[in-house]
Amino acid sequence: MLLLPLIEPYRSLSIIGMCKNAGKTTVLNRILSEIQETGKTLGLTSIGRDGESVDVVTQTHKPGIYVREGTLIATAVEMLKYCDISREIVETTGFPTPLGEVVLVRARSDGNVQLAGPSITAQLAKLAETFFSLGADVAIVDGALSRKTLCAPAVSEATVLCTGASYSRDIDTVIEDTAFATTLLTLPEQSDFSEEERAACTGKALFRMEDGSLCPLPQDLTLSDALRSPAYACVRAVYVSGAVTDALLKPVLTAGKRFEGLILSVEDGSKLLIRRGTYDKLALCGISLAVARATRVAAITVNPFSAYGFNFDKDELLSRMQARVNVPVLNVLEDVRVEDMAWHAEDMRRIAAREEAERNTDCSHCCGNEELI
């Protein structure tokens, strides 16, 4: 068992990727297999489409999503024709998608399925509740490209973050960006604002002043304006109810040491949409980041193979990632099936042939122009 010891404590789990072709479906299949070996019943859905045999962007082969009899699946009605399982429709959800309403089915045989679930956090949380009410022991949400909001505690108790060579040709970029994403997801929990105070927040932000008093952000002020105002010079902590961006933090970053010691908190790490440079500047200004609800990253998985025709040394990628983060790091492709590796080799040949054809086409255009001249 490779992943089971890391994910077994959690009833709900999300799987998110740093990019497409990070090995997320392979990770999902490994998790499904290991959990189902224990006899537990799974509830499974996805944000976006997954389970197709060929990636629509890179035209590379993808592993199917294999489930066993008894698994509960929430997917768009148009996806049912691509599922080769015998199935029982348990209920409809009323959740619309471009591929039709999401329906909940129970697998009556083993087989492959294609997923296309809802994209709204509240709907995903509701699906998890429905899975449990129908007898599921574990609920799994298969994430879409860069949708890190799925790892929010409102959706899942823990997440598995998938990364790899498809993210960048530069191994340093893969490691550093993945480590930064992990840092944001695993920020410490704040203690300045109670759950009741956050729930009662009808505006964009709350301020905890140095004297301990609570001050909501006035409706006629933006957070940026408030942070520039002398009236908020004695702020000890700020809670932002929505997303925090680089632009939102500009007044803080240009104020020098004025906000030294400030604690800026959000609901969870998925709400922080900032670059690594901004994070580093905040630290230099003496400003700390925190969250109301911490995200548990159960594991990081690495895929040394890229869908774009190159690969990293698997041992280097694994060891360097392990040294960079305080989270278990695994290479789930270590035990990948021989036929999957054959698919990968064929994909690499196809990509190389396509790139060669494109180069030849570009060259022929150039030669043609030279002849006209």
Image (cartoon, rainbow, N blue to C red):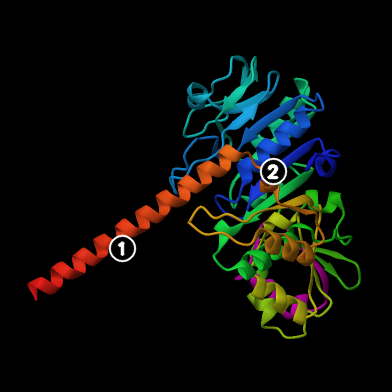
Q: Residue at x 82, y 61 (%)?
A: 326
Q: Residue at x 43, y 45 (%)?
A: 59
Left or right of 11? Residue 355 is left
Q: Can the viewer see residue 267 in this picture?
A: yes
**Residue 238 sits above or below residue 100 on the image:** below
Q: Is residue 322 magenta?
A: no
Q: Quadrant of the N terminus?
A: top right
Mark in front: 1 vs 2: 2
The image quarter containing residue 39 is: top right
Tell me if residue 249 can be seen: no
Q: Which residues are magenta?
A: 224-247
Q: Where does residue 27 sit, x and y in percent of width and height?
A: 67, 42
Q: Which residue is mark 1?
A: 359
Q: Is residue 230 magenta?
A: yes
Q: CA distance from mark 1 to mark 2?
A: 36 Å
Judging depth in this view, the residue of 5 and 107 nearest the camera is 5
Query: Residue drawn 71% across and 28% down?
Result: 43
Quarter of the figure with residue 2 = top right
Q: Which residue is mark 2?
A: 335
Examine the rendered structure and indicate whether residue 56 appears above or below residue 234. above
